[in-house]
Amino acid sequence: MAGTQNHYDGVFQRHVSARRREVGVRDVTEWAEPLAAGSTILDLGCGDGVPISEALMNAGFEVFGVDSSPKMIAAFRANLPGATAECAAIQDSAFFGRSFDAVVAWGVMFFLSTADQETVIAKVARALNPGGRFLFTAPIPMVTWEDTFAGVTFPCVSLGAENYTRLMREHGLTLVDEHSDPWENDYYIATKAEATPPRTDPR
Ligand SMILES: C[S@@+](CC[C@H](N)C(=O)[O-])C[C@H]1O[C@@H](n2cnc3c(N)ncnc32)[C@H](O)[C@@H]1O
C-alpha cells in the first residue's frame, strides 16, 4: 500500500488529541445545507468521525465512512454507532457498492499519490447521484510538501486548482467554489449535473 495508509495508526493518539473540533465543522454543515434530510454522505478519510461525520450526523444525514487506519475505524465505530464504516484505502474501496448524495474528503486527498487522486476523483464522480455535491481539502496552488506529525513524515501533493478543475470536468463534476478557512485549509466544492429530463417529442 502506498502513501500514509496505516501509518495513521502510529499517530492515532496524537491525532485525537490535536484535532481541533471546530475546524471544518461550519464549512461542511453549510456545504451540506442544501441536501434533503436523510441524504447519504460518504466521508473519505473519515478518521475517528469527530468532528466531520459527527456534525453531518447531527445535521440529520446518513453517514458512511472509509479510512485505511484500523485504529481510526475502530474509534469511528465507537464514536458513531449509527454510521456505516469500512477500513480500506479510498483508492481501493468499492464505496459500499452504492451511490451517495454527497462526498466529503477533509484532510486526506493530498496524502494520496497523483495517480491515486485521479482515481479517487473518477470514483467519486461515479458514486455521486445526479445533483450530488463533493467537498475536498487540498491547497489551491500545485505543490508538494512533507507533513511531519508526531514523528512520522507524510509525503503530500496538491495537484492545484487548475488540474483539479480539469480532472473533475473530465468526470462530469463542475467546480462551483474554492475556499480558504482561517486555519489555512483550502477546499474545493463541486457538483454533478442534475439528470436530464427525458425528451418529449413535440406534437
Ligand atoms: C488528517 S486525518 C483527517 C481525518 C478526518 N477527516 C478529520 O477531518 O479529522 C487523515 C485521515 O486520512 C486517513 N487516510 C490517509 N490516507 C488514506 C487512504 N489512502 N485511504 C483512506 N484513508 C486514508 C488517515 O488514516 C486519517 O484518518
Image (tube, rainbow, N blue to C red):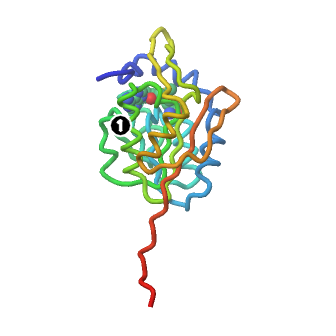
Labels in figure, total: 1
Question: Residue 180 sits in which quadrant?
Answer: top right
Quadrant of the picture in which ligand 1 is shown: top left
Residue 7 location, x and y as percent? 38, 19
Q: Amino acid at mark 1?
A: Thr
Q: Residue at x 35, y 37 (%)?
A: 119
- Residue at the outermost bottom position: 203
- Residue at the outermost top position: 151
Residue 114 location, x and y as percent? 40, 27
Q: Which residue carries the number 1 mark?
A: 119
Left or right, residue 73 beside residue 144: left
Left or right, residue 20 beside residue 53: right
Residue 198 location, x and y as percent? 41, 75
Looking at the rendered image, the quarter that the C terminus falls into is bottom left
Q: Residue at x 41, y 16 (%)?
A: 10
* 141 shown above or below 119: above
Residue 21 location, x and y as percent? 62, 32
Q: Residue at x 53, y 29 (%)?
A: 160
* 165 shown above or below 146: below
Relative depth, front residue between 26 and 113: 113
Q: Residue at x 62, y 39 (%)?
A: 178
Looking at the rendered image, the quarter that the N terminus falls into is top left
* 154 shown above or below 175: above
- Residue at the outermost right position: 182
Relative depth, front residue between 73 and 141: 141
Relative depth, front residue between 29 and 159: 159
Mark 1, ligand 1, within 8 Å: the answer is: no
Q: Secondary structure at mark 1?
A: helix
Mark 1: few, some, or many residues within 10 Å (few <14, many ≥20)? some
